[in-house]
Image (cartoon, helix red, strand yellow):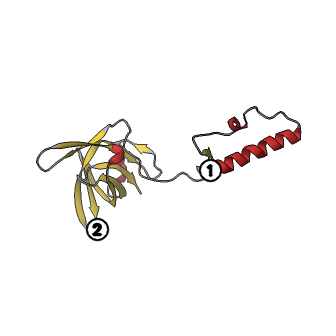
Amino acid sequence: MKKVGFPLRVAAVVVLAASLAAEGTAAPQDAETALPASGDEAVMEVAEPAPVGVPEPKPSAVGFEIMGPNGERTVVPLDRLEVREATGSLEGLDGGQLTLAVGGRRYVCPLLAECAFADEKGQPMNRAAFAQRFLRRYVRVEMERTTGTVLSCRAM
């Protein structure tokens, strides 16, 4: 979606009112209601392909718990997490861990309980079906920077 600024929206309202007046049709009382409004900007839908990205963790989770070196626990809201991506071959998906081969090295990463899995098209999948279908294939994982906990995993 593209956003349209306030001056362009006002110009569109003026043109709409002028065209309605020229046709002899009564213009709406409040021409501003003819266009969607949200604060200073209106949103117009434009035919664009949807962005392809790794699915985000489920919004039901309130926060992400990080264990410190001395055992202290900190809960970080999901929208404030520092996230990094990694691409590699899925070598295993056992219990609460994911094994990823990147550049000849194997990494074992813990999984978030609400970890999201998606196929190449971004369609959500359950964990067992994902493991069976994409084992030994390239995947992109999104993980929390501090602990390496996998938040989402998408096939490539």
Q: Nearer the viewer, mark 2 or mark 1?
A: 1
Q: Residue furthest bottom?
A: 103
The residue lying at 85 percent from left, 39 percent from top is: 21
The residue lying at 57 percent from left, 53 percent from top is: 49
Which residue was labeled with disc 1? 5
Q: Which of 115 and 32 is in front in this view?
A: 32
Q: How crowded is mark 2: few (under 14 residues within 10 Å), some or many (20 or more)?
A: few
| Residue 129 pos. (x, y %) | 36, 44
Q: In which quarter of the image is residue 125?
A: top left
| Residue 37 pos. (x, y %) | 62, 39
Determine which of the numbered discs, if any, sits on residue 40 in the image. Answer: none
Indicate the amino acid at tag 1.
Answer: Gly
Q: Nearer the viewer, residue 73 or 108?
A: 73
Label 2 secondary element: loop
- The answer for how far apart the CA atoms under marks 2 and 1 are is 46 Å
14 to 99, vertically: above or below: above
Q: Residues within 10 Å of mark 1 (few under 14, many from 20)?
A: few
The residue lying at 48 percent from left, 51 percent from top is: 121
The residue lying at 60 percent from left, 53 percent from top is: 48
Q: In which quarter of the image is residue 108?
A: bottom left
| Residue 120 pos. (x, y %) | 45, 53
Total numbered labels placed on residues in the image: 2
Q: Reading the chain from its start, which is encountered first: label 2 or label 1?
A: 1
Label 1 secondary element: loop
| Residue 135 pos. (x, y %) | 32, 54
Which residue was labeled with disc 2? 103
150 to 25, vertically: above or below: below
Indicate the amino acid at tag 2.
Answer: Gly
